Amino acid sequence: MTSKTGALEKPDDLKRRIEEAAKLVPLDQLGISPQYGFSSTVLGNKLTIEDQIAKLKLVVHGAREVWG
């Protein structure tokens, strides 16, 4: 999940990327998180607190969908 922009990824796109990774690594060894943990916002990427909250909610939703 990118922290470069505030645009939200599509949940189905995230799930597909996890499924692709699971072909190479066991699913129980995978995870999902924002790229750079939002640290890149300090250097000028324009993400508001609201954008970051929305991305974290998407992470939680995606994790629940994939791992329960």
Image: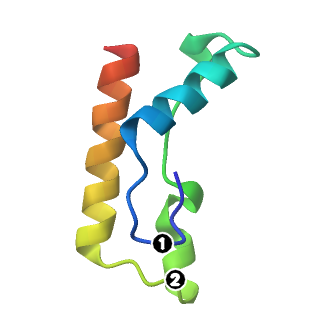
Residue at 31 percent of width and 45 percent of height:
58
Residue 51 is situated, as x and y percent measured from the top left of the image, at 30, 69
Residue 5 tag number: 1
- Judged by depth in the image, the label closer to the viewer, 2 or 1, is 1
Badge number at residue 45: 2
Q: Confirm or deny contact between disc 2 and disc 1 (CB under 8 A).
A: yes
Q: Position of residue 52 (x, y in %)?
A: 33, 65
Does 5 sit left or right of 43 as displayed?
A: left
Q: Nearer the viewer, residue 33 or 58?
A: 58
Viewer-nearest residue: 12 or 47: 12
Query: Among all residues in the image, which is located at the extreme bottom?
Result: 44
Residue 39, how many percent across, how many down?
53, 71
Q: Indicate the amino acid at tag 2.
A: Asn
Q: Residue sitting at 54 percent across and 89 percent down? A: 44
Give the image's coloring scheme: rainbow
20 shown above or below 36? above
Residue at the image point whose x is 26% and y is 60% from the top: 53
**Residue 48 left/right relative to 24:** left
Relative to 29, residue 17 above or below: below
**Residue type pointed to by label 1:** Thr
Please tell me which residue lies in front, 27 or 9: 9
* Image coords of residue 32 (percent x, y): 50, 37
